[in-house]
């Protein structure tokens, strides 16, 4: 039995309260429901506060804040496909422009009300995304990004070359006053509320996806699409539905933008800079999170406006420099950075939060001298350590191990670390890979090559079918808590 020291977090001291808060942020299954309830509660309070803020703003400020809400919704929509799924869509502005021009055409030529036009534009954007997404989502990385950018440019050219329908380069004007107006113009206050509601819907969709089964499937696709497919995830359907949902939200916001501007020219709603802003906002705030796009959009949109007012010359250069510094020092985004900081303990973990293995895995026993073995028990991957300086050991669990031929040869079953938190040994399940029967092997972490590919974990080795069969079988057993006697 290994003795593990406890600290004040196991008692009713201030340290205990700090430990409880840290445990809440760490996200154990017991408090997952509570954290979700707190998140929805904070979101509701922010929404109520945003409605109240309207009464404190003058006309110019109302329009500025409306633009901020618009970008919050756009960033949250892009986050579905770019953040959760890991497919960087550089042509997202195409759905924005498609929604805008669909609304304008319906209101001008068919005299359809704005509300019905917005609903139809949302459906059109979703269907178009599903249509082009089915072939495009077979591409990955920069190939997908460039292909979607080409789709957006193609849509812009179509709009320019259909002057009778879209007005072409001369633009199209939606009637908003008089008997020819299908729907009266909403005014600055009305668009403030409309963009706020659209932003709230987009963020809420992201919140639902984050904790749903589909959300876990999207994260699996992001980490290792082949492994997700092997686990039974219909990756094509998941990606296409997400792409269509992201486009639908973007199209709805584009429809509201068209009615707000009343006069549309092709260059603005199809401006690639809108997509660039979406991406920057999500990356700065934290991709793949619910709050990240909101924080990033508010920071960038307000920062851009403030710099434009106070630094008339060179404001874009200053904003670009700030963004570069933020990406360099917080590459994972603000929310992920804050989350990682909250997970890092400032004192030893309590005994209840530590797990121990009473026996060393064979790889350690074969290579270590007794004097070199740590005096404390090896902890499991549930600890607060980072692999490769960034990713927690938890993220390694289930990661696919591939050989030099890019063939899957196993999956990481568990991780062992020494007393300092350094990864020593990993248990890899190789059963079913390369025709090998049920089998676990324990190998030194230093024998594997760890790297990243499109933000996915890539672990390489030179294993072959023959070498896997020759490896000794490690009888892996689930570990027991350190404060209990081991077998």
Image (cartoon, rainbow, N blue to C red):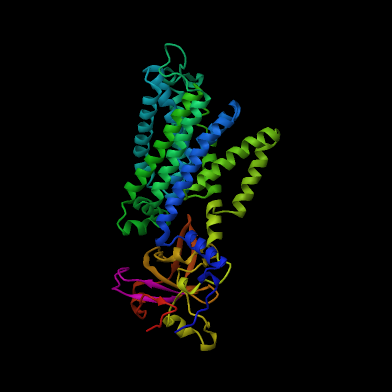
For the question of whether residue 280 can be seen, the reply is no
In the displayed structure, 263 sits above or below 91; it is above
Quadrant of res 356: bottom left
Q: Is residue 311 left or right of residue 14?
A: right
Image quadrant in which the N terminus is located: bottom left
Q: Is residue 230 left or right of residue 198?
A: left
Q: Looking at the picture, how far across and down is residue 486, in whole percent?
A: 40, 83
Q: Residue furthest front?
A: 12
Asked whether 333 or 231 is in front, the reply is: 333
Q: Is residue 210 left or right of residue 63?
A: left
Q: Looking at the picture, how far across and down is residue 477, in whole percent?
A: 35, 77
Identify the residue at horizontal 34%, vertical 71% (top origin): 430
Asked whether 81 or 405 is in front, the reply is: 81
The residue stretch that appears in magenta: 425-443
Image quadrant in which the C terminus is located: bottom left
In the displayed structure, 281 sits above or below 375; it is above
Identify the residue at horizontal 39%, vertical 42% (top origin): 243
For the question of whether residue 80 can be seen, the reply is yes
Identify the residue at horizontal 44%, vertical 54% (top origin): 35
Q: Residue furthest top?
A: 179
Asked whether 314 or 65 is in front, the reply is: 65
In the displayed structure, 419 sits above or below 321; it is below
Say if the magenta span includes residue 341: no
Q: Looking at the picture, how far across and down is residue 172, in whole percent?
A: 47, 19
Say if the magenta span includes residue 433: yes
Q: Looking at the picture, how far across and down is residue 66, in whole percent?
A: 53, 32
In the displayed structure, 332 sits above or below 240; it is below
The total of numbered circles placed on residues is 0
Identify the residue at horizontal 40%, vertical 20% (top origin): 107
Quadrant of res 127: top left
């Amino acid at each position: 039995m290994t003795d593990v020291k406890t600290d004040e977090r196991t008692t009713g001291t201030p340290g205990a309260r700090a430990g409880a808060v840290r445990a809440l942020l760490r996200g154990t299954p017991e408090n997952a429901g509570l954290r979700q309830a707190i998140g929805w509660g904070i979101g509701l309070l922010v929404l109520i506060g945003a409605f109240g803020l309207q009464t404190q703003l003058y006309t110019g400020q109302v329009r500025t804040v409306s633009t901020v809400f618009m970008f919050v919704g756009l960033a949250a929509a892009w986050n579905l496909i770019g953040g959760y799924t890991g497919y960087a869509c550089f042509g997202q502005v195409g759905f924005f422009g498609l929604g805008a021009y669909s609304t304008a055409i319906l209101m001008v030529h068919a005299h359809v009300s704005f509300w019905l036009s917005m609903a139809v534009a949302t459906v059109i954007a979703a269907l178009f995304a599903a249509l082009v997404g089915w072939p495009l989502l077979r591409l990955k990385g920069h190939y997908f990004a460039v292909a979607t950018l080409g789709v957006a440019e193609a849509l812009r050219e179509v709009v320019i070359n259909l002057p009778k329908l879209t007005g072409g380069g001369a633009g199209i004007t939606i009637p908003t006053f008089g008997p020819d107006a299908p729907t009266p113009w909403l005014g600055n206050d009305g668009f403030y509320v409309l963009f706020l509601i659209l932003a709230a819907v987009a963020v809420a969709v992201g919140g639902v996806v984050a904790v749903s089964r589909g959300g876990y499937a999207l994260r699996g696709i992001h980490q290792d699409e082949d492994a997700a497919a092997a686990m039974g995830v219909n990756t094509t359907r998941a990606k296409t539905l997400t792409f269509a949902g992201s486009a639908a939200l973007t199209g709805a916001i584009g429809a509201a933008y068209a009615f707000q501007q009343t006069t549309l020219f092709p260059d603005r709603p199809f401006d690639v800079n809108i997509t660039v802003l979406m991406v920057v906002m999500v990356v700065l705030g934290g991709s793949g999170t619910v709050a990240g796009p909101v924080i990033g959009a508010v920071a960038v949109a307000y920062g851009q406006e403030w710099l434009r007012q106070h630094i008339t010359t060179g404001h874009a250069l200053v904003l670009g420099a700030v963004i570069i510094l933020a990406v360099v020092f917080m590459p994972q985004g603000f929310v992920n950075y804050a989350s990682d900081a909250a997970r890092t303990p400032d004192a030893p973990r309590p005994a209840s939060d530590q797990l121990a293995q009473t026996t060393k895995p064979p790889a350690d026993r074969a290579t270590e001298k007794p004097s070199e073995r740590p005096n404390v028990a090896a902890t499991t991957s549930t600890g607060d350590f980072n692999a490769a300086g960034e990713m927690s050991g938890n993220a390694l669990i289930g990661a696919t191990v591939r050989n030099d031929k890019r063939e899957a040869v196993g999956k990481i079953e568990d991780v062992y670390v020494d007393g300092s938190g350094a990864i020593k040994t990993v248990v890899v399940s190789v059963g079913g890979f390369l025709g090998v029967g049920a089998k676990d092997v324990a190998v030194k972490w230093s024998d594997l090559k760890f790297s990243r590919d499109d933000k996915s974990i890539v672990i390489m080795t030179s294993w072959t079918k023959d070498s896997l069969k020759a490896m000794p079988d490690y009888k892996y057993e689930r570990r027991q808590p350190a404060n209990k006697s081991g077998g």
